[in-house]
Image: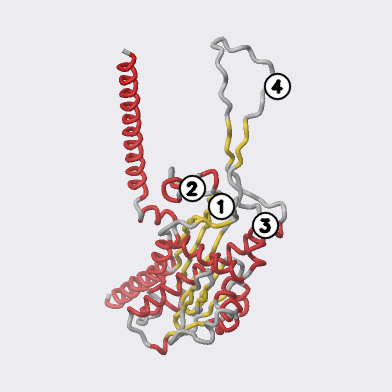
Amino acid sequence: MTWAIWIAGLLLILIAVLYLLRFLKQESFVRHEFTAAIIFDPKNKTHVEIDQYNFSEQFEQTLNALFVENEALKTAWESESMFVPPEKKDAPKETEDKPEDTNDKKEEKVSYYAIVKQVSKNDEEQASQRSILLETAEFCLLEFLSLHLSSYFEQTPYDKTRIVTIEREHIPAIMLENRVLSLLTTPIEDRQIFVKSGINKHPPQGKVHSIYASNGAVYERFNLILPKGTEITRPQPGVIRLEHRHFILEMECIFHGFCLNLPRYFEKLYIGSDSKKIAPRELNIAVSAQLRKSSLMLLKGWTYYHWIDSFMEYIENHVSFEAFLKRIDWISVSTKIRTNMILERKKAQQKDGLVSLEAAQSKSHKES
């Protein structure tokens, strides 16, 4: 009887352990996808920055820094016709005879706006602009990751022997296929735009992390604080992967050229532009993380991996356009602005009406 109890107890423990391992395996993979907003001015071939939207501000700064130093990439970008505004077309004329309108009213001319996916006729040009866009987005994500990791490890006690600082010279050559990353992280003594200014001869004291020039040029020191043994790769354009024996973190930029529907009045009230003059596009950012089987055996040391959870929230706050709209409470703000505009217009109309009435009364009085 005792042996039966022991065997039953061991079976229950085994079942519980197997269930726990299965649960942990299911929960060890997570993927979040966010939609970022990229707005272009097709006429001027420029990116339109959205104030207080972190991704848009970083994207704008990075593009400006890239184009101020690399005229060839700027020319390639401006030669594109991918980001064109919605096309306005008149309704086709009817060829069949129509009976005359008995009310003798003129029929109003109808116009249409088409929202479509833009495809360049020249595949090479399309790939050129798309690649510049993806490389810029990759650089922005790496900047966010660097800032988050620095902040995390500054606030978290850790053993210096268990982490490593990955810098430019430590990354594989395939990472430098990203032209934005390669250019903006190149030391200032190797860049003509900084050599001409003379700043390379008299650099600031201490370890320089960033330099921002008034003409838009930027230097960013590549710096990622990660658990020792982490490798960073770029499996394909638009994808950055961090791989460790305990985890895999992957950031992916997905761009198909699809239009983005902005909230009503957002262009006019927040950006200060006509909706017909800009071309909003959506860029999807997917962040996935997976804990490997070896991590399930960890009894301590989770401090070096908890940043993955907080990074998911961090990247959503900085990249997601929906999160940005919630942060600025756009629904409430736009309602108040529209209400105030309507009230002001009505007051102006009433004032104009009173002036007209007073003028008419004055004229009538003079004539009498």
Amino acid type, residue under disc 1 in the picture: Asp
Q: Residues within 10 Å of mark 1 (few under 14, many from 20)?
A: some
Give the foreground label among 2 and 4.
2
Amino acid type, residue under disc 4 in the picture: Thr
Seen in the picture, residue 94 relative to 67 is either above or below; the reply is above
Q: Are marks 2 and 4 in contact (CB under 8 Å)?
A: no
| Sooner in the amino-acid sequence: mark 2 or mark 1 | 1
| Sooner in the amino-acid sequence: mark 1 or mark 4 | 1
Amino acid type, residue under disc 2 in the picture: Ser
Q: Are marks 2 and 1 in contact (CB under 8 Å)?
A: yes
Residue 27: image location, x then y, percent: 41, 66
Q: Are marks 1 and 4 in contact (CB under 8 Å)?
A: no
Seen in the picture, residue 365 relative to 55 is either above or below; the reply is above
> Residue at image x 45%, y 49%?
272
Q: Which residue is mark 1?
A: 41
Residue closer to the observer: 328 or 240: 328
